[in-house]
Amino acid sequence: MKRIIQETEDGSKTIYIEDWDETYHSKHGAVQEAFHVFIKNGLHHFITDQNKLKIIEIGLGTGLNAFITMLEAEKNKKPIEYVGVEKFPISEKEFELVNYFEDVFKFYPELQSRKKEFEEFYQHLYHCKWEEWIEISDYFKIKKIEEDFFNLKDSLEKEFDLVYFDAFGSKVQPKLWEIDLLRIVDSLTKTNAIFTTYAAKGSIKRGLKELGYIVEKRPGPSGKREMMVGLKNINH
């Protein structure tokens, strides 16, 4: 599949898959979408306590969500263990071309004195080994898994508090948004968990409800009217 680097409206870049007419991130802004959907409407539900948080991302992609999450972990001194699952890892050249470091770091002026250190963390996130736990910083560990999402039913990693569901859109991969995969992902979570995604598709709403989640449609990021959050035994 031919993949092309494109600039989004907030100046950050994304990868466009020509064969699918699909981008990895919103054309209205990769960074603003990631922060709004996964940090503001996901991670921030847990940020006030200092207990360890375990996150699984379905669709590691460019690593953008993982990097912002790592910055949040350091900023808030919040221990986070992060599993990123990706069937088709991006190439080193693609990683260098999208380069989110400056786009993201400008939103964290309180960490400015550690900029050089965080640039090393950003590089380490991409270059570190797959299939094993890697400590990136004092508060952030990651395990990158190269796998088909449907094979996660056999995953050794479980007990997740938070799901970042960032798979490609339903128009190109509809099976990723149906109950079979949702059931597999849910089986990896704790009794109390949150599921957050950029989509507001009816099938995922019905699937999450079937699995016992309270589903909330919330305002979407710039350029998108709605997004969706599922709450499983979590107070609103």
Image (cartoon, rainbow, N blue to C red):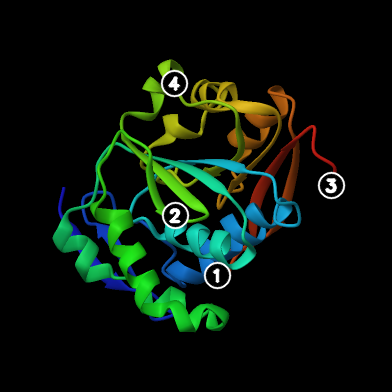
Residue that appears at 35% across and 77% down: 116
Q: Amino acid at mark 3?
A: His
Nearer the observer, 1 or 139: 139
Q: Secondary structure at mark 1?
A: loop
Residue that appears at 57% across and 71% down: 222
Crowding at dot 2, Cα within 10 Å, few <14 / some 14-19 / many 20+, comes out as many
Nearest to N terminus: mark 3 or mark 1: 1
Nearest to N terminus: mark 2 or mark 3: 2
State whether residue 82 appears in this view. yes
Label 2, label 1: how many angstroms apart (C-alpha)?
A: 22 Å
Q: Secondary structure at mark 4?
A: loop
State whether residue 106 appears in this view. no
Q: Is residue 196 above or below residue 132?
A: below
Q: Secondary structure at mark 3?
A: loop
Residue 156 got which mark? 4
Q: Is residue 85 above or below residue 46?
A: above
Label 2, label 3: how many angstroms apart (C-alpha)?
A: 25 Å
Label 4, label 2: how many angstroms apart (C-alpha)?
A: 20 Å
Between marks 3 and 1 in the image, the one whose residue lies nearer the viewer: 3
Q: Amino acid at mark 4?
A: Leu
Residue 223 got which mark? 1
Q: Quadrant of residue 27?
A: bottom left
Q: Is residue 55 above or below residue 98?
A: above
Q: Amino acid at mark 1?
A: Gly
Residue that label 2 marks = 66
Residue that appears at 52% across and 54% down: 139
Q: Are marks 2 and 3 in contact (CB under 8 Å)?
A: no
Residue that appears at 60% across and 59% down: 39
Q: Quadrant of residue 146?
A: top left
Label 4, label 1: how many angstroms apart (C-alpha)?
A: 38 Å
Residue that label 3 marks = 236
